[in-house]
Image (tube, grey):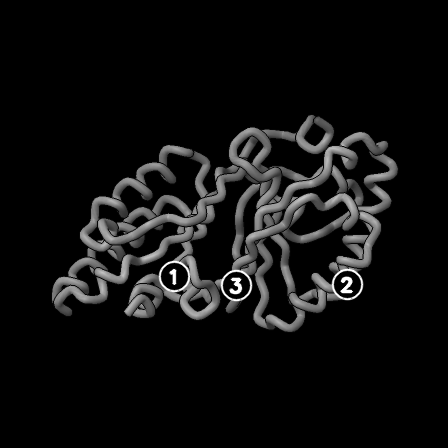
Amino acid sequence: MAEVAGSPREGRQFVRFAFYKVDPAWRRLPGPEREAGKGQFAAVIEELAERMLCRTFSTVGTRGDADLMLWEASSRLEDLQELAARLTATSLGHYLQMPHSFLAMTRRSIYIEGHAHEGQERTQVRPRGSKYLFVYPFVKTRAWYRLTKAARQSMMEEHFAIGHKYPGVKINTTYSYGLDDQEFVLAFESDDAASFLDLVMELRETEASQHTLRDVPSFTCLALPVREALEALG
């Protein structure tokens, strides 16, 4: 498969986007019990964040099926598993469902030889710390993989050219071939939602867009420190 062949493996990370939905019954618990659960949950994230990436985002008010998102990355898959297990074991975790979870890995894009494009060339996740993160899984058509490398390169260069028109939007592309249901997970960082919307509209007009099989669901996530993100739960 041309998309994933021949890339150096050193320094690559597992990446997970975990979306949580709180059971309404949790909001009917006594206040002290809710606060204790939030404290346990936050303490787990703060502890593991010392040895892996774990950024918290609120989706309250932007999605009906999720309230909280964790952007996780580590060179060890076991770190992601430990984080999930320990969060589930907290008293708040007993009231959380996981409607969406996307697993991927970093790797250098095969389309950026001789071309600098932030978020495509690194094997380490390095968040900008922007206000918003826009996340969606992505699958290409099988016909895309039957095209020549030169044809795909030409279409991707058109994509890159449009992306450079929006310097305030940083793309983080991660790869899921064989790891999860999607082929990629795309995560765009920006402080301006309008710029991201305009970028996506313009990309719809490119030739490569005809090879998009699926790019939903889409998530608009608001970056918040973990304890503030938990406060937003209610």
- Res 52 seen here: yes
Residue bearing mark 1: 67
Q: Secondary structure at mark 1?
A: loop
Q: Are marks 3 and 2 in contact (CB under 8 Å)?
A: no
Q: Is residue 42 left or right of residue 11?
A: left
Question: Could you say which is closer to the camera, residue 200 or residue 25?
Answer: 25
The earlier-in-sequence mark between 3 and 1 is 1
At horizontal 15% and vertical 69% (from top left) the residue drawn is 31
Residue bearing mark 2: 202
Q: Residues within 10 Å of mark 2 (few under 14, many from 20)?
A: few
Q: Secondary structure at mark 3?
A: strand
Looking at the rendered structure, the kind of residue marked 3 is Thr
**Which quadrant of the figure contains the C terminus?**
bottom left
The earlier-in-sequence mark between 1 and 2 is 1
At horizontal 63% and vertical 59% (from top left) the residue drawn is 170
Percent across and percent down for residue 135 are 55, 55
Percent across and percent down for residue 110 are 73, 37
- Res 56 seen here: no
At horizontal 59% and vertical 32% (from top left) the residue drawn is 177
Residue 81: name its quadrant: top left
Looking at the rendered structure, the kind of residue marked 1 is Asp
- Measured in 3D between alpha carbons, the distance from the residue under mark 3 to the one under mark 2, in whole angstroms, is 19 Å
Q: Which mark is residue 131?
A: none
Q: Secondary structure at mark 2?
A: helix
Q: Residues within 10 Å of mark 3 (few under 14, many from 20)?
A: many
Residue bearing mark 3: 220
